[in-house]
Image (cartoon, rainbow, N blue to C red):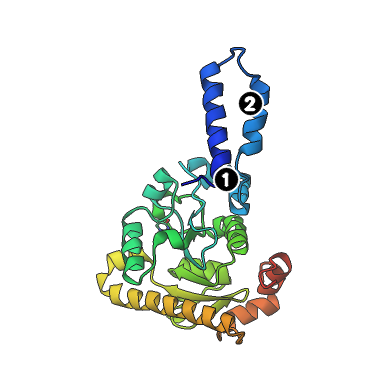
Amino acid sequence: MRASRPADAREVARILALELEIQGDGPALDRDLLQQILRAHAPKPSPLQEFYLQIRDCQKCPLGRTRTHFVFGVGNEKAEIMFVGEAPGADEDLQGEPFVGRAGQLLNRMLAEVGLRREEVYIANVLKCRPPGNRDPLAEEVAQCLPYLRRQIEIIRPKLLVCLGRIAAQALLDVLTPLNRLRGPVLEFHGIPMLVTYHPAAVLRTPSLYDAAISDLRRAVELHRQILEREAAGMPAVQTEVLPEQERRRKTKGDGSVQAMQETLPLDE
Ligand code: URA
């Protein structure tokens, strides 16, 4: 099969890189010229990759000093469903990827059970660095790190957000509502429908939650289907609910409020 253009460019870059490596400082080809060609052929980073490069060395909070890896996020940059967890744990800190430990394996299994693949969705956390001893994120850490997640959401523009556990939902909505009230309604974050389910770690601790978590995920899949169907038919968006606490926040809080966010995040463009 004939290689496509981008593959040709990659192949040229690969051969030139090899040439550079073999040749060392020898006279065969001009080293600067080779480097120029390589740079010109290097694939342009995507907006999400560019954002990662901007923030990966973050030291805004003390977790920057204790982390092994900055755990940015994983999955399809064009995902229509985005999952949001709390913070990296020990395994995620070591591997640099969200949800790769026991909770992650359970999440993968649950996604598969409802017909989703990890590669087709996007997964990120509220905090990008591991809190020591897996304690809950502190308010100051959330305040420093949340803008990163908001920007990821803005770049990916998922059609549906699924919060894994209370902390993710509370952080995004800027409320202290307990999980039993967050779980159930179709909430919204800047016009993006949002569902909340149990954190996989909670399901590991309390296996009897498994069925309920699966039924939440099935609901997410069905809601996503409805969102697409309505879009295709030019129908109004799915109905969402604004929590009274969210409403109060909108009215009383000048910054970080939904209204202020709408000015900085053109999510509904
Ligand atoms: N728990 C989370 O909330 N996120 C991870 O990435 C891993 C465990």
Residue with the most extreme front position? 1
Q: Provide the secondary structure element on which disc 1 rests.
A: helix
Q: Which mark is residue 215?
A: none
- 151 vs 87, left or right, is right
- 133 vs 73, left or right, is left
Mark closer to the observer (2, 1): 1
Residue with the most extreme left position? 208
Mark 2, other Cα within 10 Å: few <14 / some 14–19 / many ≥20: some
Residue drawn at 39 percent across, 67 percent down: 116
Question: x, y (%) of residue 137?
Answer: 49, 58
- 111 vs 230, left or right, is left
Q: Is residue 248 above or below residue 140?
A: below
* The one of 217 and 185 positioned closer to us in this rendering: 217
Residue drawn at 56 percent across, 22 percent down: 20
- 237 vs 213, left or right, is right
* The one of 66 and 190 positioned closer to us in this rendering: 190
Q: Which residue is mark 1?
A: 6
Question: x, y (%) of residue 50?
Answer: 62, 48
Q: Provide the secondary structure element on which disc 2 rests.
A: helix
Q: Which residue is mark 2?
A: 34
Rounded to the nearest angstrom, the CA distance separating label 2 from label 1 is 18 Å
Image quadrant containing the C terminus: bottom right
- Point out the quarter of the image occupied by ligand 1: bottom left
Question: x, y (%) of residue 201?
Answer: 34, 63
Question: x, y (%) of residue 86?
Answer: 46, 61
Q: Is residue 13 above or below residue 63?
A: above
* The one of 226 and 92 positioned closer to us in this rendering: 226
Image label count: 2
Instruction: Point out the tag, 2 or 1, that comes first from the N-terminus.
Output: 1
